[in-house]
Every structure is written in structure tokens, then in C-alpha cells.
């Protein structure tokens, strides 16, 4: 089944404790991206990647890191999480560039206390 | 710059029509439409590329007026399953990042 998976689905952590949210797709998609969703603000892009080893900042990249060492994986790293990073995070992938249908993962709800 | 969606929310009775608008102050290459049900991930509806095309499937269609940098999503004879939040995403150039609007909440009453 074609899908985008994220782990964990729910995470409660404390300020400053490094964490990684994994994202994996099995569709051989080149384009992958991370969004955060907050009430009333819509979906805001954090980082995106056009292909392996190619990443670029979205609209709200501060406090986040990403890497794309393999085509299928695009982990989101929070080196020192803060309460303002409490949010719902979605990973998405598409065949090539952003001009194609994006497939979203199920979401990761992160709470930083 | 984030596109502006209107209305912010709408309540309809089953069978009524709805129009959701998405506008940008910048020239656009494409407009994307997604629907998100509560507690779920956004699901793709359609993409419109510059050229003023109109797309649709079933009773959901959309238009893109590139001169006005506007897109409209049309939901005809709405069904209960249409309830959710609709997002438009805009792209200024090919291979550019997508910027999503804040969403329009649609609630269909039986």
C-alpha cells in the first residue's frame, strides 16, 4: 500500500530534550516536506527536499533541522525543543517538485512542556 | 505570502452549494486544493496550473483566474461527507514551495 508513515504519532517531551520525528514513504517520491499545523494558522511549511541531499527552508524553519540521506526518509530534528514548538506535524511527499499531488502522513502531535 | 481564503467558515444544509475562494497578491504558477477531516491528514483534491484552467471531479470543481491570482472551489449539491476544512496552497513558480492558506471550515447539516 502506498503510504507516508510518521513516528511517533504522539509525543510529550520537556524543553531542551532533543527529539527526532521520522518520516518514510514507499512511493519512490523525490519531493518531501514537513509542515506544522496550529489552530487558525493553517499548514506552514518547515523544510522541504527536492531530492536526496537537497533540502531548503520553508516559511518557519527556525528551531528545526532535517536531513535527506535516503530517498525514502526525511526525519525532522528538534535539537532543543521549546514550548512554542508544540504543534501537529505533517510529513508529505510527492512524485516530483511541489506541482504534483502531495501525500500526507498521519501526523505527529508534539507537546513540549 | 500566505494566500487569503474566504469565507473562514460556512454552514450548509445537505444539497446546498458552496464556493470557497483563495486569493493571492502575487502572480501564481499553480493552486492546490486539499480537504482535511477532523483528526486526519489533508487529502488532495486537485491542482490547477496557470493558464486559467478549470478542473473537477464528481460534484467538486475549481477554477483558476491567473490574471486575478484567484482560485475558487465549487461544491455542488453538498453531501455530509464534504464536511471538513478546505485548504488552498499556492505556488509562485514551478518547483517553488507551496504556501497554504489558513483554511475554510465547512460544516454540512443533514
Image (cartoon, grey):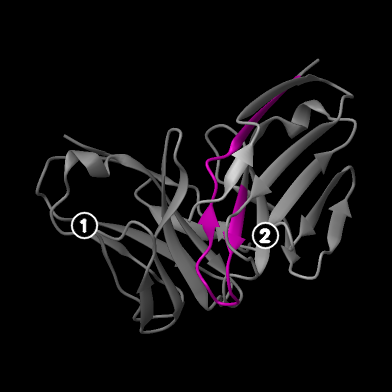
**Which of labels 1 and 2 is toward the front?**
2
Q: A83 or B104: nearer the eye?
A: B104
Secondary element under disc 2, as helix, strand or loop, is strand
Start-end of magenta stretch: B88-108
Task: Give the residue displayed 30% in from the left and 74% down from the top.
Answer: A67
Task: Give the residue displayed 56% in from the left and 32% down from the top.
Answer: B38
Instruction: Report which quarter residue B110 is drawn in.
Output: top right
Q: Is residue B42 above or below residue A52?
A: above
* Chain on which label 2 sits: B
Secondary element under disc 1, as helix, strand or loop, is loop
Can residue B21 be seen here?
A: yes
Task: Give the residue displayed 62% in from the left and 64% down from the top.
Answer: A2
Residues at circles 1 and 2 in contact by the CB criterion of under 8 Å: no
Is B105 colored magenta in this rendering? yes
A41 on left or right of B67 = left
Is B40 colored magenta in this rendering? no
Q: Which residue is mark 1?
A: A63
Q: Position of residue A56 (x, y in %)?
A: 37, 74
* Chain on which label 1 sits: A
Numbered tag placed on residue B31 in the rendering: 2
Amino acid at each position: 500500500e502506498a503510504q507516508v508513515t510518521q513516528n511517533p504519532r504522539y509525543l510529550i517531551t520537556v524543553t531542551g530534550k532533543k527529539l527526532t520525528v521520522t518520516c518514510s514513504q514507499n512511493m519512490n517520491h523525490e519531493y518531501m516536506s514537513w509542515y506544522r499545523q496550529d489552530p487558525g494558522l493553517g499548514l506552514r511549511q518547515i523544510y522541504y527536499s527536492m531530492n536526496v541531499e537537497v533540502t531548503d527552508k520553508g516559511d518557519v524553519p527556525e528551531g528545526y533541522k532535517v536531513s535527506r540521506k535516503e530517498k525514502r526518509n526525511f526525519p525532522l530534528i528538534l535539537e532543543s525543543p521549546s514550548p512554542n514548538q508544540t504543534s501537529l506535524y505533517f510529513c508529505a511527499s510527492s512524485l516530483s517538485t511541489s506541482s504534483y499531488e502531495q501525500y500526507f502522513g498521519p501526523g505527529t502531535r508534539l507537546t513540549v512542556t | 505570502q500566505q494566500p487569503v481564503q474566504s469565507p473562514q467558515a460556512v454552514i450548509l444544509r445537505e444539497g446546498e452549494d458552496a464556493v470557497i475562494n483563495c486569493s493571492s497578491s502575487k502572480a501564481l504558477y499553480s493552486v492546490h486544493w486539499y480537504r482535511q477531516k477532523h483528526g486526519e491528514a489533508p487529502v488532495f483534491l486537485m491542482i490547477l496550473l496557470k493558464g486559467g484552467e478549470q478542473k473537477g471531479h464528481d460534484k467538486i470543481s475549481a477554477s483558476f483566474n491567473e490574471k486575478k491570482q484567484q482560485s475558487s472551489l465549487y461544491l455542488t449539491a453538498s453531501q455530509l461527507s464534504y464536511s471538513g476544512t478546505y485548504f488552498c496552497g499556492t505556488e509562485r513558480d514551478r518547483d517553488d514551495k507551496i504556501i497554504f492558506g489558513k483554511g475554510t471550515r465547512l460544516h454540512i447539516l443533514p
